[in-house]
Image (cartoon, helix red, strand yellow):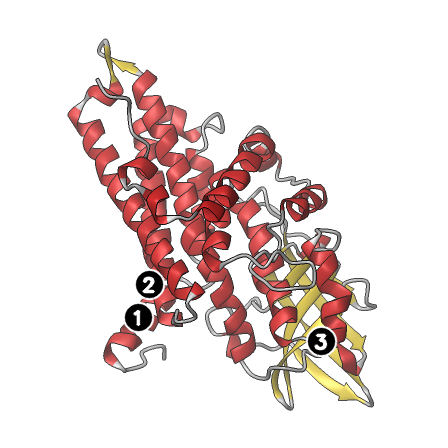
Amino acid sequence: MPAPMTTDQLFALDTLLDDDERAIRDAVRRFVDERIKPDIGEWFETGELPARELALELGKLGVLGMHLEGYGAAGMSATSYGLACQELEAGDSGIRSLVSVQGSLAMYAIHAYGSEEQKQEWLPRMAAGEAIGCFGLTEPDFGSNPAGMRTRARRDGDDWVLNGTKMWITNGSIADVAVVWAQTDEKIRGFVVPTDSAGFSAPKIGKKLSLRASVTSELVLEDVRLPGSAVLPEVQGLRGPLGCLNEARFGIVFGAMGAARDCLQSAIEYAQDRKVFDKSLAGYQLTQAKLADMALELGKGQLLALHLGRLKDAGTLQSEQVSVGKLNNVREAIQIARTCRTILAANGITLEYPVIRHANNLESVLTYEGTSEVHQLVIGKALTGAEAFR
């Protein structure tokens, strides 16, 4: 009998990567295997994450804002960043979320739209993991429709005064800086808000059954006074936050496949070891049919992610194409997790195996950075030219 193939081997994925991309992927995979996987079940169960400690380690690894140029960032390709996200989410969606919010939301906003002073003040420390950022866009009543946000910034002399509430903010309670989007008389604007500002608070959200190994918070701004230099000078309107979200969604396209791959690997290993009626569970046709179907969807999702990575590196990636990737890959990843759970049966609901943890996490990934319904409408508009959001 030939040795069993991995899904990477089944699709010959390594042949599509260059030496640097493989090296980055392998380095992040080793970090996840050695640093994340041994403890992630306990972190998920307790709802606690050593986020500040991990941020410093992730900074040394070079993955924080790794696709950005300068200011201490690694300046890697988009594809390399995507491959890192895949390996991080094979560990846990919460770990990839920490990195995504830091690099693709908070750091990217400052890098793309900030002043040179803002970049110099924050980006080197954020790339090193010495300062943690969060991204304040979503509000309690405004998720899919960010244009309706109620958070407001008003001029008061040379200063800005912010009032409002943001919800479901990753890294919020541990952040040193928050990028907050608010309505102004000059359209929606972004603000760089040090979290030690008077009137700023970030209570942690508890009782979560998903993304438990992740810090999720509310942001409360009560007459937070900021100098005029706090505004992001290079963007007005929704173009700013939506541009950041597109960066984060790109990472999810890869990341979701990492969670799916970890589930499938776990299910294959379990099926090979588990005896049912004196025969390996892996030797039954129904089991092999499930594994084959899941491997196909995983491989297709990985190929789609790589294709989008190449388009992004070429500077030709369209936002509608990111929606294709996010919709397909997260939808397939959660189905893979659920099917793997059936192979593990009762053992599949314990934290001894990663499957139920990934499945629970993917319930959040399914709806954040744009729900499946929103991405369906984005794709529908691209195909028909007709907007159906309202």
> Sequence-wise, which precedes: disc 3 or disc 1?
3
Task: Please say whether residue 203 is visible from this viewpoint.
Answer: no
The quarter holding residue 380 reads bottom left
Q: Amino acid at mark 1?
A: Ile
Q: Amino acid at mark 2?
A: Val
Disc 3 to disc 1, C-alpha distance: 35 Å
Vertical arrangement, residue 44 with respect to residue 384, above or below: above
Disc 3 to disc 2, C-alpha distance: 36 Å
> Sequence-wise, which precedes: disc 3 or disc 2?
3
Disc 1 to disc 2, C-alpha distance: 7 Å
How packed mark 1 is, by other alpha carbons closer than 10 Å (few <14, some 14-19, many 20 or more), is: some
Question: Which residue is tagged 1?
Answer: 379
> Sequence-wise, which precedes: disc 1 or disc 2?
2
Q: Amino acid at mark 3?
A: Asn
Q: Where in the figure is residue 66, as x and y percent of width and height?
A: 58, 56
Circles 1, 2 touching at the beta carbon (< 8 Å)? yes
3 vs 1, front mark: 1
Q: Where in the figure is residue 18, as x and y percent of width and height?
A: 42, 48
Question: Which residue is tagged 2?
Answer: 324
Residue at image point 57% right, 43% down? 212
Residue at image point 21% right, 17% down? 1
Q: Where in the figure is residue 40, as x and y percent of width and height?
A: 57, 34
Which quadrant, please, contains the C terminus? Answer: bottom left
Q: Is residue 90 left or right of residue 2?
A: right
